[in-house]
Amino acid sequence: MSASNSYKEPKQFEKEEQKLDLPDDEPALVKLFLQFLYEMDYHIPKKEPGSEPATLCLEIVWGNDQLERRVRRNLDEGLAKLNDKAMGRTADIAQGHRSYLLPDENNSVAIDSSELDISIIFELTTLINDPGSSNGPPVYRPDLDVGLMIYAKVYCVAEKYNIKALKELAVENLTYELPHVMVLFTNNEIFDVIDYIFSNSLDTKGCEMRRLLASEVYGCLKIFGMKSRIEEKMKQYPDLALLNVQETFGD
């Protein structure tokens, strides 16, 4: 077999006016892209063992409850601002009322929002409103620091070079990670992902990543109501607003 027959130039990754030009300043993205081409998969490095916070963290699992949206917003935003000492107190409060709550592998105590009675809400709100609770940086949560942006960048690279399987994998990975991070109102990285996707992905009806993020926004709006930062993003990206209208009235 001649050399000309044994090697075929990867035309699917080049166009007449467009060559593969992954940014040199993002070696991690280049590595993931090449890894996928060879292995049909890519792997995000996991956090180092022992990086969990020293104190227990309270995590509210928002579900079916009778709370007002204002109360949910205040709790969710307040918890995200607490320093290490105050966050440790939140876990004590929850376990003081619900002794069966045990920490998970991420050193978090999870409580369903339907279990938040008046006494728990009062104690948490009092702690949140204490000026000393937010002095200094908020407690670091490595379990929430999952690198969402890398999935957005991988998706846009795959879209640019029309690699369908890589696009699908990026959407699948982000879909998996979203339930494991703080909800939209207290996770700044999700706003960064929205900016990146709605600025860099193709403006097409079938953009799966846009629909995924719009669905996340829609779910958070149902739980917490409108928030100024969400309103800002909808004005900035009309397609985000349109997708949310379709989520609401698409039946």
Image (cartoon, rainbow, N blue to C red):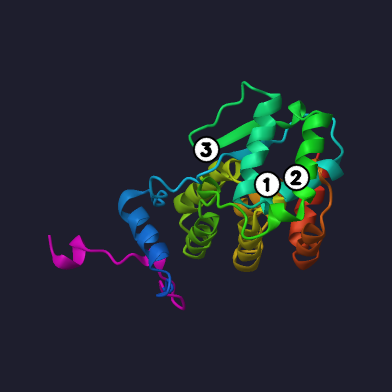
x 71%, y 25%: residue: 97
Q: Main secondary structure of the magenta part?
A: loop
- Counting residues from the start of the chain, the first of labels 1 and 2 encountered is 2
The label nearer to you, 3 versus 2, is: 2
Q: Residues within 10 Å of mark 2 (few under 14, many from 20)?
A: many
Q: CA distance from mark 3 to mark 2?
A: 20 Å
Residue 88 at x, y = what percent? 61, 42
Verify whether residue 243 appears in magenta. Answer: no
x 70%, y 52%: residue: 133
Q: Which mark is residue 107?
A: 3
Q: Quadrant of residue 180?
A: top right
Q: CA distance from mark 3 to mark 1?
A: 18 Å
- Counting residues from the start of the chain, the first of labels 3 and 2 encountered is 3
- Counting residues from the start of the chain, the first of labels 3 and 1 encountered is 3
Element at badge 3?
loop
x 51%, y 49%: residue: 142
View extreme (left): residue: 1
Location of the N terminus by quadrant is: bottom left
Residue position marked by numbered label 1 in the rendering: 183
Residue position marked by numbered label 2 in the rendering: 127
Q: Is residue 248 visible?
A: yes
